[in-house]
Amino acid sequence: MRPMVLDPLFSSVSTLPGIGPKIAKLLTTFLSSQPDREASVADLLFHIPHSVIDRRHRPGIAYSENGDVVTLDVTIDRHMPNSRGSRAPYRISAFDDTGSITFVFFHPRHDWLEKMFPVGERRIISGKVEWFNEQPQMVHPDYVMAPDEADDMPPIEPIYPMTAGLSPKTLQKAMNAALKRVPHMPEWLNAAHQTQNLWPEFGDAIKALHHPEDQKDISPDSLFLQRLAYDELLASQLALALVRKNMRQLGGISRNPLGKLQEQVIKALPFSLTKGQANAIKDINVDLAEPTRMLRLLQGDVGSGKTVVALAALAQVIETGSQGGLMAPTEILARQHFASMSPICEKAGIRLALMTGKDTVKERRITQEKLDSGEIDLVVGTHALFQGKVTFKDLALVVVDEQHRFGVHQRLALSAKGKGVDVLVMTATPIPRTLVLTCFGDMDVSQLTEKPAGRKPITTVSVSLDRLEEIIGRISSAIGNGQKAYWVCPLVEESEKIDLAAAEDRRRVLEQELRQPVALIHGRMSADEKDAAMQSFKSGQTRVLVATTVIEVGVDVPDATIIVIEHAERFGLAQLHQLRGRVGRGDKASSCVLLYKGPLGETSGARLNIMRRTNDGFLIAEEDLKLRGGGEILGTRQSGTPGFRIARPEDHADLMEVARDDARLILETDPDLTSERGSALRCLLYLFARDEAIRFLRAG
C-alpha cells in the first residue's frame, strides 16, 4: 500500500488548475515514468530547470547586447500595423533615454496590441534583444506590463527542457500549483549524514529548485540538487539491494565439484590464462560453492577472453551433473560461440548443442527432448529462445552475453527455468564504475583488463573523407599482401534504406577500384545470407567485408587487420571502440582508420582524439560518460535499468557510492524497513517509482 502522505503527489496532472486533457496528454508523453498512466504531480515536480533567466538585467536599449534577455523601461512611440491579410509583421516602436527599439509581432491581434502598448505611456517589457541592420528589435516579448504591475514579473525565471505544444507560461503555472501540493515528508535521510552535508528538507529542496534565486541554485553541486539527487540514488540502490537480498534468499545450491572438468577445459585451450581470467574463475568458483545464488557481472574489454571464463564456470556445474546455457544477443554470435567452444568441449567431453531460430520443428523437438533427458550438458542460443518455451532437466548456470537490456525482471524470469539458477552476465562494453553501481548494483563484479598474450595494440588514425582514394589505394596494397579488411558504413537513423544504399554503393566502388569481389553484410539480410558473407570473408574467398554496424559485437576473424569506419563522427565512443575491437585479434599489427567529414563539431573532435590516444576501453567509457551522460551509454532507456530524472551519474558519482553503502547498512540493521526511518524509506521507494522492490519485504 502506498503511504497516504504521498497521495497529493500521485494525483494526475489534470487535477492541477489550467491543465486540460490536451496539455495533460502532452505532459504524459513528455514526463510520465509509466506511459500507460497519466503523468502525476510528482512527475511534474521531478522535471527540473536546466538554467535561469535573470529579469533584473536592465542595461537600457543602447547597451543591450545581441542575444541577451533584458528588461526595458520604455515609452511607446507609435504602431506600424500590417494591412489585414498581409504576411508582413506588425511593428511597434518605443524609446528610453539611451535610444529606440522596435517590437515585432507575427500573426497579431491588432486590438490586443493596441490595448497592451498604449501610445505615449510607459511599459516594462522583457525579452530577447536582436540587432538587425544596426537597429535593436525584440520579437514577441515575454512580458509586457504597466509600471504598477512590474512587481508581478519574476526577477529570476527557471528555464525547463520543453516539448512542442507546451508553452513556458503553462508549464510554470502548473509547476507553481504542483509546489503547493508538496506535503511535509517524513525524513528518510540518516540525520548525521544530512547535518554533515547541510542538506535541506525534501520539500524545501524541491521548492528552491523551482524558484531559484541564482544559476548556482540549480548547478549539480547546489545543496538543493545534491539532496534530491541523493534521494533518487538512495531509492535506486535500496531497490537493487532488496532485489539482490531476495535473489539470495530464494536459495541457491552449493555447487562444489573437484574441478576436474574445469581443469580439462583449461588444458584444452591453445593458450595459457591471463591473471585476470584466473582470478575471475576463482571468484566464480567461490560463488558457485556458496548455498546462495550467484549474480556476477564479468566486464572485459574487447578481446580480453570472457568466453573462456564462462566455459570454465559452466564446466563446474556440468561436473555436478547439472546443465548450463549460454545466451547470445544475435544468431551470428550464438553460432560463433558454438564454433569456438566446440573443439574445447569435445576434448573435455562436454555435450554441446546449438539452438537457433533457423532450426526446423523436428530439430528443435530433438534438442528439447535431449535437454529434458539430460543428454545435453550445455546449450547455446539467442535470448529469445531462452525466454521462450525451452525447458531443462536441471539448469544450474546461465551465462548472458552482451546484453545491457537484460534487466532485473529478465534475470528473475530466467531463474524460474531451474532450481537456484546461478547467473553470470558478460559485457564487452566497458561500463564506468558509476553506471555499474546504477544498473548492476545487485551484482558482484569481475573485471578482465589484460589482453591475451601475443595480441598487438591497434594503431588508430583519423583521416578526412577528402583522402578517400588514398585510403582505398592503401587497402589495395594491404590485401595484395594477404591482409583482410572491414569497411563499416555509417548508420543513418532516419532510414534503413539510406543505410543500405550507402553500403551497397560503397561495395560497388570498392569492387571497381580493388578489382575483386567484396562481401556485404547489413541488417536486412536473412541469417543465411549473413552467414554466407561471413564465411566467404573468414575463408579468404573475399578479402574485404563491407558492413553496417551489425558487425559491432563479437565477430571474430583473427586474420583481419584493418578496419575503416566511414563517417566516424556519427558514432558514439563506445561504438567506435567496439568496432575497432574487430581487428587486433591475432598476432599481426592492426590498424583502424576513422574517416570523417569535416568540419568536426567539438564533441565529435573530442571523441576521435580519445580514440587516437588510447586503446583502454575502461578509460574510453569514463570519457564517454562525460561526453554523453549515463542513459546513452547503456543504449536506449531499457526496462530493468533506471533512467534518472534528477541525479546525473557523471556529476553525482560520489553520491552513488555513499548511497550504495547506506542501502546495504539499512538492510543489515532494519531488513524489513519497520523502524521509523524504515517506514520513511518506504515512502522514498514509492516516490521514485522503485516500489516493485517493496514486494520483497516480508512485511511489505
Image: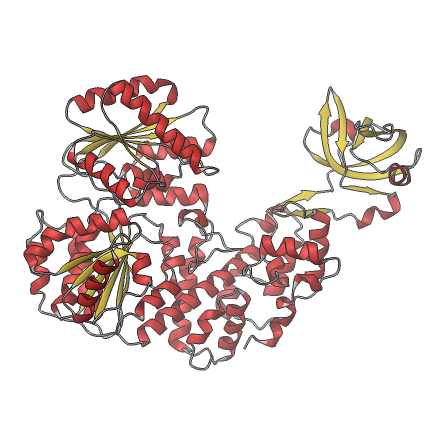
Number of dots carrying numbers = 0
145 on left or right of 412: right
In the image, 292 versus 70, the foreground residue is: 292
Q: Is residue 301 above or below residue 679?
A: above
Q: Residue at x 35, y 36 (%)?
A: 548
Q: Is residue 554 left or right of residue 27?
A: left
At 43% from the left and 68% from the top, the residue drawn is: 238
Residue 263, percent from left and from top: 7, 60
Picture layout, residue 324 above or below residue 622: below
Camera-side residue of 433 and 46? 46
Residue 696: percent from left, percent from top: 41, 75
Above or below, 257 relative to 626: below
The N terminus, quarter of image: bottom right
Expressed as whole percent of the image width and height from the top left, the position of residue 369 reads 20, 67
Where is residue 658, by image quadrant? Answer: bottom left
Q: Which colour scheme appears in the figure? A: secondary structure
Is residue 683 in view? yes
Q: Is residue 326 left or right of residue 669?
A: left
Give the percent coordinates (x, y) of residue 182: 65, 66
Which residue is found at the position 48% from the left and 38% from the top? 494
Quadrant in the picture for residue 319 = bottom left
* Outermost right residue: 120
Query: Residue 509 or 78: which is nearer the viewer?
Result: 509
Q: Is residue 578 visible?
A: no
Which residue: 43% across, 63% down? 659
* 663 shown above or below 629: below
The picture quadrant where one finds residue 68 is top right
